[in-house]
Image (cartoon, grey):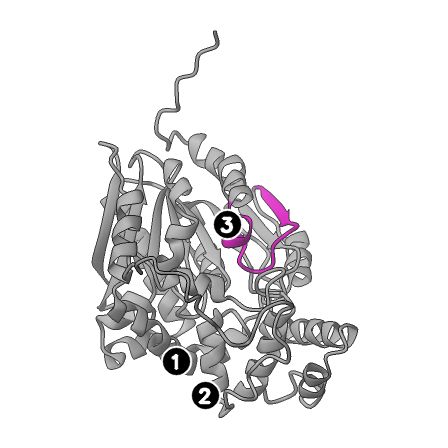
């Protein structure tokens, strides 16, 4: 199953014994050379990573007297876990972001989409057990006992309790993306009174069904485009997923699904965001190096539980549910999410379809994503009085 970013897909392939030769794409995008070149005419000085991160950090500095900008370690589940807490006004409602993966932290790339959110919400990015900065400051031995769905759901509950108590909030908004929706559904089921709403983005509904739909999509696209390499590799795995799903087969299916835009619509890979991640003002080089290591560690513990997820009949919620769906998402197949949404019973529910997105809606349609956070989620907190004063406007 591919609730993973590019580096995690590569780890899947390597773990399965695949070589760089047979994980390469069949063809380069039109007009793009397979060999990178540097113009000899370009004599402008190159900026270092430190220069870039310093500029980004200055650009997104929070200067409001009511603002909050904290990067802190909190003792959660017996280990130190990292939180980034940012917002222009601490009187705004808290929005906790549960990242995907497992172990694909959103914190290092959040600067590419999150800054406008901070006008309306206090946004919390949490590097989960085994992920990013949290992986970097703990031993694998210390993290391993909690590397289960139940253990990480308990971690998430402790994070929510910390936020509610430390910042004086009765309720918060809970947003789960991809793997984070597994934790989000469990948490919303266990503690609905903690949340104004559960916001689902790239919902995991059923692990094995998702594999079937993603495989069918990749094969269908490969046949339509006459891609002989893709057809050959995909048909060699049939029937898929089969009784015993191997890492090699998951990696192969993921590769072609991503190639045909099932992860990021209109793109054959995720390099654009991986490049942005490498310039993160919130991550050191050591933190960046920990991402891949944490992904491999987490894969060993959580891949099979992720494939076993079945929320087909988990459809009763006692808090509002908002579901964001990328119309071209085959990483978490959009048709499974749409069917699941139809069965949901909740105090209120809303589905928003993003026409030009696949799985990474925050990056693919950031403006519309924020608009729907503000129009669909924020009013639920405002109705409870959990909001900063709004702007004063005057007509001439």
Q: Which residue is drawn at 29% across and 37% down?
A: 90
Measuring from the top left, give residue 286's x and y in whole percent. Answer: 25, 71
Q: Please tell me whether mark 2 sits on a helix, a strand or a loop.
A: helix
Q: Which of marks 3 and 2 is in front?
A: 2
Q: CA separation, marks 3 and 2?
A: 33 Å
Residue 196 located left or right of residue 202: left
- As rendered, which of 217 and 211 lies closer to the eye? 217
Q: Please tell me whether mark 3 sits on a helix, a strand or a loop.
A: strand
- As rendered, which of 306 and 249 lies closer to the eye? 249
Q: Which of marks 3 and 1 is in front?
A: 1
Do labels 2 and 1 touch, CB within 8 Å? Answer: yes
| Number of residue marks | 3
Is residue 230 covered in magenta? no
Q: CA separation, marks 3 and 1?
A: 28 Å
Measuring from the top left, give residue 96's x and y in whole percent. Answer: 38, 51
Mark 2 vs 1, N-terminal side: 2
Q: What stretch is highlighted in magenta?
A: 348-366
Residue 225 located left or right of residue 84: right
**Dot 1, crowdedness within 10 Å: few (<14), some or many (≥20)?**
some
Measuring from the top left, give residue 182's x and y in whole percent. Answer: 49, 64
Decide: is 179 above or below 17: above
What residue is pinned by disc 3?
Answer: 199
What residue is pinned by disc 1?
Answer: 296
Q: Which residue is drawn at 54% across and 51% down?
A: 317
Q: Please tell me whether mark 1 sits on a helix, a strand or a loop.
A: helix
């Amino acid at each position: 199953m591919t609730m993973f970013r590019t580096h995690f897909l590569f780890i899947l392939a390597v773990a399965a014994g695949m070589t760089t030769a047979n994980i390469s794409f069949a063809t380069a995008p039109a007009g793009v050379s397979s060999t990178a070149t540097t113009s000899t005419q370009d004599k402008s000085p190159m900026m270092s990573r430190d220069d870039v991160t310093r500029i980004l950090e200055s650009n997104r500095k929070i200067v409001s007297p009511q603002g909050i900008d904290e990067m802190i370690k909190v003792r959660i589940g017996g280990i130190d876990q990292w939180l980034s807490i940012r917002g222009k006004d601490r009187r705004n409602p808290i929005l906790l972001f549960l990242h995907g993966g497992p172990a694909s932290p959103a914190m290092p790339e959040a600067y590419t989409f999150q800054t406008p959110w901070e006008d309306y919400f206090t946004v919390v990015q949490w590097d989960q057990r085994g992920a990013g900065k949290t992986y970097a400051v703990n031993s694998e031995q210390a993290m391993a006992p909690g590397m289960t769905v139940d253990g990480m759901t308990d971690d998430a509950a402790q994070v929510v309790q910390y936020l509610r108590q430390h910042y004086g909030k009765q309720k918060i908004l809970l947003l789960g993306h991809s793997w984070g929706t597994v934790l989000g559904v469990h948490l919303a089921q266990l503690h609905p009174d903690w949340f104004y709403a559960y916001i689902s983005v790239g919902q995991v509904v059923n692990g094995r069904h998702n594999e079937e739909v993603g495989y069918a999509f990749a094969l269908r696209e490969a046949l339509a485009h006459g891609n002989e390499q893709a057809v050959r590799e995909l048909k060699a795995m049939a029937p898929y997923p089969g009784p015993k799903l191997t890492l090699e087969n998951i990696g192969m299916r993921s590769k072609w699904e991503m190639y045909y835009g099932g992860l990021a619509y209109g793109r054959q890979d995720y390099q654009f965001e991986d490049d942005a991640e490498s310039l993160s003002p919130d991550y050191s080089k050591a933190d960046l190096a920990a991402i891949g290591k944490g992904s491999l560690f987490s894969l060993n513990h959580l891949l099979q539980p992720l494939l076993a997820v079945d929320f087909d009949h988990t459809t009763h919620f006692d808090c509002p549910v908002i579901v964001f769906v990328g119309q071209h998402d085959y990483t978490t197949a959009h048709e499974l999410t749409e069917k699941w949404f139809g069965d949901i019973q909740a105090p209120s529910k809303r589905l928003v379809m993003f026409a030009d997105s696949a799985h990474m809606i925050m990056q693919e349609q950031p403006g519309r994503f924020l608009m729907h956070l503000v129009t669909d989620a924020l009013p639920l907190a405002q109705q409870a009085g959990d909001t900063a004063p709004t702007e004063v406007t005057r007509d001439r």
